Image: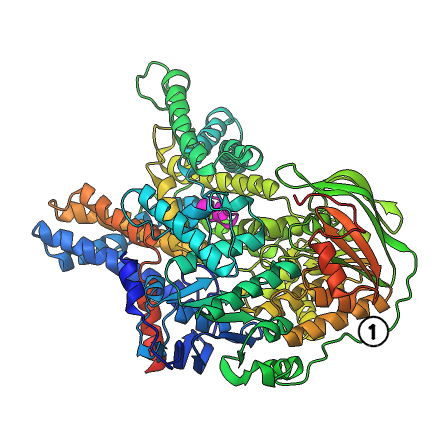
Amino acid sequence: MSVVATGPAAGLPRWAVLGLLPALNLLAAFAISGLIVLLIGENPWEAVRLLVWGAFGFQEAIGYTLFYATNFIFTGLAVAVAFHCGLFNIGGEGQAYIGGLGMALVCLYLDFLPFALIAPAAVAGAALFGAAWAFVPAWLQAYRGSHIVITTIMFNFIAAAVMAYLLVNVMSRPGSMEPESRDFAPHARLPLMHEALGAIGIDIAASPLNLSFLLALLCCGAVWVFMWHTPAGYRLRTAGASQSAALYGGISPARQIIVAMLVSGALAGCMSLNELMGVQHRLVLEFTAGYGFAGIAVALMGRGHPVGIVIASLLFGALYQGGAELSFEIPSITRDMVVVIQGLVILFAGALEFMFVPAVRAALLRGRGG
Amino acid sequence: MSFPETRRNTPPTADAPAVELLRIDKRFGTVHANREVSLSVAPGTIHGIVGENGAGKSTLMSILYGFYRADRGEIRIAGRPAAIRNSEEAIAAGIGMVHQHFMLVDTFTVVENVILGAEGGRLLASGLHRARSELSELAREYALDVPPDALVGDLPVGLQQRVEILKALYRGAEILVLDEPTGTLAPQEADHLFRILRRLKAQGKTVILITHKLREIMAVTDRISVMRQGRMVAHRDTSATTVGELAELMVGRRVLSEVKKGAAKPGRDLLSVENLRVCDDRGLIRVHEVSFAVRAGEIVGIAGVAGNGQSELLEALAGLRPVARGRILVAGEPVGAGSRLRRHLGLAHVPEDRRRMGLVMPFEARESAILGHHDDPRYRRVALFDWATISRDTASKMDAFDVRPADPRRITAAFSGGNQQKLVLAREFERDPLVLLVGQPTRGVDIGAIEFIHHRLVAMRDAGKAVLLVSAELDEIMGLSDRILVMFGGAIAGEFPAGRATERELGLLMAGAGSAGRERGAP
C-alpha cells in the first residue's frame, strides 16, 4: 500500500489523502452552507438540486460551467507550478490582468494579420506579459530575498492601477468615457465552441465556452509533462522540496524561482484569452474578477496535480454557474450568498485542508486494529 | 503550572522500580515500532538502552515522555500506574528528558532557558532570582557548573547539554532520560558528562541512557537493555556482558567490529588542497589556510569535534561553498573558484546531512537517485526523462548496495536512515569517480549497514580512488583511515599515519589540548 510519507498527512494512505480528505472538506463546506440556507428559511436540498441542475442540468449550463472552469484551470495551474518550487504566488490576479493587456495589444494592433497568425500571437502576448509581470517579484525573491507573497500582492495593486490608467487615458475608445478598449476585429476573436463544432456539423447549445478551453487542457498536459518528465521540471521540484539538496545537485534555487514564476505568470496570463478574446472581445476593467485568487484554492484542492486541478476547476465552475442559476431561481439566496458558499469551499479545501487528518487517521487505525 | 506540588507527588517508594514499562505496543501506520516492550529500571541506577536505528528506542522514550501514546501497555512510575499524555504530565511525574538536539533558545541566557516553561509567576524577577540560587545549589551538588548569565548560543555544546540537564533537574526530575547524549561531544566532554551522571546516580537519581555507542554504555551503566526491531531482546547487568555480546544481540549476529583491509598502495595525488581558507555564511573564517593531499588508493580521515571547520572544508571541496583563498586541485588540475559542482571532474560527494542535502525526501527513490546527474543524457529520450531506464538503473544500484526495500518508486523519506544512506552511496560510488568526499557516512545508521558501508569504502580505496573521510566517530576514523588529520579551530592540529594514533592522543588534539598542532582558539 502506498503511504504518504511527509507533511501533515504523513502516514495516511494515498487514496485517503487524494480522495477522502477533499471529499470530507467539501462535505463540511456544504453542510455549513446548508445550515445557512436553512437559516434564511429555504430548503437546502432544493438548493442543492437547483445548484447541480444549474451547473449540469442542460447543455447551455454545461457550457457555462466549462467556460468558468477554463479560467480556474489557468489560474490553478499557475499557482500549482509556483507551489512546486516552494513559492506562494498570490499574484495570479495581477499576472492575468497584465496578460490581458499583452493579448489585447495583439488583437487591437496586429489585426491586419489573419486569424491563423493572430491566435498564436495573442497566446504569446498573454503569456509573455503575464510572465513579465511575475518576473519582477521572482527576481526580487531570488536575488534580493524580498518575500514573494508580499511582492506579488503589491504587484496586484500595481497591475490594477496601471490597467485603470491605460484604459481611461490611453486605450479607451475615442469619444467614449467608458474605461474599455474598442472591440477586437471579428477575425481577432476566439471562436466559440458551439460555432466551431457547428462548423463541423455538431450542434450544441450556445454558451461562452470557446476554444481556449482546449488550450487550458493542453496546458494541463504540458504542465504534467514539464513537471514530471523533463529535467527542467525536476530541477524546479528539487529546489521547491529542498534548497540544500538543490545546491548539492548543482541546481541554482534562485534560477528555479525565476523559471517557476515565469511559467506561473504565463499560465495566469492565458486566463485573459478565455475572458477577453473568447467572450468580451475587448479589454475591460477588472475582467479577472478574483479568478487569480480562486486559483489558489483550486491548486490546493487539486493537490498541485493537473488532473486534480481539472477536477477542482470543474467544481468551482459548477459552483459559479450553478450558483448563478440558484440565485435566479430562489431570489432570497442572493449572489452574495453564493459567494459565501464558494468562500466556505475555499476555506475548507484550502485553509483547513488538513483539519480532518487526525479523525481520518484514528478511523483508519481503528478499522485496522479492530 | 504548579510544579512545587508535583514534586511532592512522587516520593520514591522503597524497592519499586523507578520506571516500569509493561507490554508497550505502538504502531505507526504499517510500522510496528514497539512490540510488547517491557522495561524495568531500578531507582538510583544508570540504565542503558541500546539498539540499531529504527529498533524502537526513541519511540519507547517518546512514549515515556508523553510525545506519543502507546496503543497498548502500561507505564508505572515508582510503582504507581501513571497516565502520561503529554510532556507536562511527564515532568509532573518526575521525568526529565535531554534530547539529542537541544531544545534551548540560543538568544536567552542560561537562567532564562532553565526557567522557560516554569517561570513561576507573572513577573520574571522572582522566578529568575529563585532559579539563580537553585542553580548554584544544583551546580554544587552535581558538578554542573554553567555561567548562569551567559547566552546559551555562546556556550560550547558540552555546556549547552549541561543546561539541558539543569533544566530537567530544576523541574524536579527524579528520572533523567538522555537520548544519544555524546553525539556531538569531544571524548573529554563525554567523560565529564559521565562523571555528572555518576554523581546524579550517587544522589539517588535514576538515569536512562539511549545510545548506539557500546563502549560508552559499558563504561557508565549498571544495567543494559537491548532492543531489536521493536522488541526488547535482552536485559544484562553491565558487569556480566561484553561489547561483543551486546553488538551481537543488537543485530542478531556477530559483528566484525574491525574493518579488514590490506595495506594501502598510495599512488599520485588526486586531490590537493593548498592554503585553503573558507568562510561560513556570516563571513567568519572557519578553515584557516589548510593544506593537504589525498593520493590515489588511500583513505584520509579527518577527525574533529563537530563545528571545527570540517563541514565547511568538505563543502568547499565539493564546490558548495566559495573558496576565500588558496586552491583545490583534482588530478593536478586546479578547479575554478566558483560554486559549481565538480562532478564532471570525477569528484563524488557523500554529504554529511543526507536528509537535507544528499536526498530529496518527498521524491521517489529513483528521483533521488539521479540528483546531480539529472542532466545526464543517458536518462533521457529526446527531451524527456526515460523513467523506465532510470527505474532499471536505480533498481540495479539498490541491488548492488543492498537498499531495502529495493523499490525505485518508494518515497525517499519512507526508507530507514541506513537505507537512505546506502542510496546516496550507491549514487555517488556507481559513477566511478576519481575522488570521493565522504561526510559522516554512518551517522544514524545501524550496525549491519555500517559494516557494509565500511567495506564499500575500503573497496573504493583498493580500486585506486582517493577517499577523504570526515567523521565524528573516532572508531570509524581509526578503523578506516590510512592517514588521520585532526581538525581543531579550523586548522589541522595534527597528522598521524594509520595505527600510530591512540584514541587518547586524537581526543586531546580534537579538544584543542594538543601540543603538536598549531594552537588556535575555538571559533
* Nearest to the observer: residue B309 or residue B403: B309
Task: Find residue B323 and report its horizontal and vertical position in percent.
Answer: 74, 40
Which residue is drawn at the image coordinates 27% and 57% (left, top)? Answer: B2
> From what the image shows, is residue A152 above or below residue A112?
below
* Image coloring type: rainbow
Residue A204 seen in the current view? no
Disc 1: host chain: B
Task: Find residue B23 and report its horizontal and vertical position in percent.
Answer: 40, 83
* Nearest to the observer: residue B444 or residue A73: B444
Which residue is drawn at the image coordinates 34% and 28% (left, top)? Answer: A285
Q: Using a 10 Å C-alpha cutoff, classify the residue at mark 1 as few (fewer than 14 neighbours), some (14 to 19) or many (20 or more).
A: few
What is the magenta range? A77-87
Question: Magenta residues: mostly which secondary structure?
Answer: helix
Task: Find residue B167 and report its horizontal and vertical position in percent.
Answer: 43, 56
Amino acid under disc 1: Lys
Q: Secondary structure at mark 1?
A: loop
Q: How many marks?
A: 1
**In this picture, residue A342 sits left or right of residue B321:** left
Residue B387 seen in the current view? yes
* Nearest to the observer: residue B393 or residue B40: B40
Q: Name the residue tied to disc 1.
A: B261
Which residue is drawn at the image coordinates 62% and 69% (left, top)? Answer: B445
Task: Find residue B457 and report its horizontal and vertical position in percent.
Answer: 77, 67
**In this picture, residue B413 sits left or right of residue B27:** right
Q: Is residue A84 magenta?
A: yes
Q: Quadrant of residue B465?
A: bottom right
> From what the image shows, is residue B449 above or below residue A77?
below
Q: Is residue B345 magenta?
A: no
Which residue is drawn at the image coordinates 43% and 30% (left, top)? Answer: A155
